[in-house]
Amino acid sequence: MKTSIPQLLASIESAINHLQLGQQPAQLYDPIRYIMNLGGKRLRPLLTLLSYSLFKEQYEPAVKPAVAVEFFHNFTLMHDDIMDEAPLRRGKDTVHQKWNKNVAILSGDVMVIQVYNLLLDLEDRHLKPVLEVFNQCAIQVCEGQQIDMMFEDNDEVSESDYLEMISLKTATLLGFCMELGGILADVKRDTKKKIERLWHKIGNRLST
């Protein structure tokens, strides 16, 4: 029996809400809970579960890695907001606005560590390939953010340069989500790459 998208989203929210984070110091952990509870479409973890569900019926083994993706995504938002000096995120105060920049930087750092904590629960055969692909994805996201910041000092930005930036900053992570689902479902390498390329292209469309 196929699982519905609302059911997948409910599983993602439940996993996020039940995740064990530290308690003290509160100024380190409260900002993480705050940004994770601001809502959002949960598109990236949903794509991971949908990709996994193409090949496996029981999606539960992919929930925790999907949550790891959402943690990474929200970490990037937290740090992007600092760099952009953005006052609002999803209609609410950004973390650095509600607390301060130093708190937002350090809480964001903990979020990245939490990503790896979540991924450490992967089965041995999945851990190395997932970490290799994730690390490359994370580097490309940072490259895209750096290019985005460099644009602020340019009087003109070509269309090709802009498309490269959003491909790195946004589409890369969407593609990784789909490839992650394929890795966890033990699909063949060429199939994983086809999935990743497909959703990377769709991600570019969604980003423009």
Image (cartoon, grey):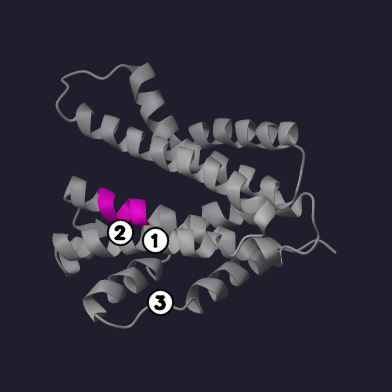
Q: Residues within 10 Å of mark 3 (few under 14, many from 20)?
A: some
Q: CA distance from mark 2 to mark 3?
A: 14 Å
Give the residue pinned by disc 2. Answer: 109
Q: Position of residue 189 (x, y in %)?
A: 72, 35
Residue depicted at x 33% and y 72%? 34
Q: Residue furthest right?
A: 1
What is the secondary structure assignment of the residue under circle 3? loop
Q: Is residue 59 visible?
A: yes
Number of labelled discs?
A: 3
Tag of residue 200: none
Give the residue pinned by disc 3. Answer: 21
- Magenta portion: prevailing SS class: helix
- Compared with 178, 67 (above or below) is below
For marks 2 and 3, the one nearer the N-term is 3
Residue depicted at x 28% and y 29%? 147
The segment highlighted magenta reads 75-80
Q: Are marks 3 and 1 in contact (CB under 8 Å)?
A: no
Q: Amino acid at mark 3?
A: Leu
Q: Position of residue 83 (x, y in %)?
A: 19, 46
Q: Quadrant of residue 163?
A: top left
Q: Are marks 2 and 3 in contact (CB under 8 Å)?
A: no
